[in-house]
Image (spheres, rainbow, N blue to C red):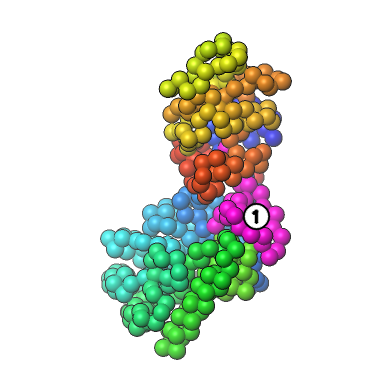
Amino acid sequence: MMTDNNSCGNYIFDRSCVEIDLDALKHNFEEIKKATTPGTGILAVVKADAYGHGAIEIAKTLIDSGAAGLCLATIDEAVELRKHGIDVPMMTLGFTDPTRFKDAVKYDVEQSVYSYEIARELSEEALAQGKTCKIHIKLDTGMGRIGFKTDGSETEEIVKACTLPGIEPYGVFSHFAVADTDDDEYTKEQYRRFMNQIEELGAKGIRFTKRHICNSAGILRFPEMHLDLVRAGIILYGLMPPGCPKPVVDIDLKPVMNWYAKVIHVKTVPVGATISYGRHFTAERPTEVTTVGIGYADGLSRKLSNGFELVIGGKKCPIIGNICMDMCMVDTTDLEERPKVGDKVTVFGSERSADELADALGTINYEITCDVGKRVRRLYVGG
């Protein structure tokens, strides 16, 4: 708990902040390590600004904790980390525009390859720079997004891609579609397709240093599929994949992100008074209206208007009226202790899970942390 109403941890904030607990992050990594087969490396997924947590500090902490490498979504995410002195292996998981292959090779960012044309253009760029480009062959085993087919029809194309000059076929990977559900047969079928395609490529002389298919749910539920690397994502940040069945091993995760705001005004309105745009709330009793310095521009969805609760003084208080761009109002009439300007307001974190917001919005916890706005200051504690 914070000891200063005007602080997030030990730091001053004016409207809203997220406190990123690096000790919780380290704890989660150790828990994931316990659940991972010995000898299997852990790739830390820090794409989308580390799911909204801030990629630079998160990446540094995870590297210090023993991560084998980092997974990004875009070349710009990787270049930013390189420019901040992070020199561990990095790979992009999806699409990189060919116009950015120059940066991919220059900054030693391992690329996902799912067509011969991608490999050919990477080969040409690597030769132009006098370097070797490590690639990870992406296989579509049933996700249906990107990847070479695994029915044997594109085996020769993969072979051609892997034997181009300037190319090192370092890794091969795929992605589970339903490892976080009880449809285990589909997951097992994806794994079977993956391993069969690797075996077929091996028969043609193509062998990979690293094979990886397990995401967060795969790590926790299918240890027999861990292979050379696993990719830890949402569980790093202390959240479970929504709906995920019980893990094979017990795992104790701690939320890394705590989102706080501040009370900026308190007043009492009479019966019949209306609140906010559209006048969708009318006071049926004298109502204490507490205005909070957070709105939809900060990432608090307007869909949470009129009913969702924020936590003040350890008690849940309902939002009344529509959430505004920079502010929202809550009913604090029933609080035993009157709120005052500067008091802390909790959106989610250790005191209340991000899953509650996700459930209220009909989405998943991944989206909740990613949607916290850039103008909300990230403050790092612990570590």
Q: Which of the 4 image quadrants contains residue 77? A: bottom left
210 is higher (above) or lower (below) than 291? below
Q: Position of residue 383 (x, y in %)?
A: 64, 48
- In the shown orientation, is residue 59 left or right of residue 73? right
Say which of 259 and 320 sits in front: 320
Q: Is residue 242 magenta?
A: yes
- In the shown orientation, is residue 39 left or right of residue 82? right
Helix, strand or loop at mark 1: helix
Label 1: few (<14), some (14–19) or many (≥20) C-alpha neighbours in 10 Å: many
Q: Does the magenta stretch include residue 19?
A: no
329 is higher (above) or lower (below) than 81? above
User: Residue pushed farthest top?
Assistant: 270
Q: Which residue is drawn at 51% across and 44% down?
A: 362
Q: Give the range drawn in magenta.
A: 233-262
Determine if residue 305 is in view: yes
Q: Residue at x 59, y 31 (%)?
A: 309
Q: Residue at x 57, y 37 (%)?
A: 259
Determine if residue 13 is in view: no
Q: Position of residue 346 (x, y in %)?
A: 61, 33
Q: Residue at x 45, y 39 (%)?
A: 374
Q: Count of labels shown?
A: 1
Residue placed under numbered mark 1 in the picture: 28
268 is higher (above) or lower (below) than 81? above
Q: Of the residues shown, which amino acid type is indicated by label 1?
A: Asn
Q: Where is residue 126 in the image (x, y as percent from the top left)?
A: 32, 71
Q: Is the magenta stretch mostly helix, strand or loop?
A: loop
Quarter holding the N terminus is top right
Q: Position of residue 152 (x, y in %)?
A: 39, 82
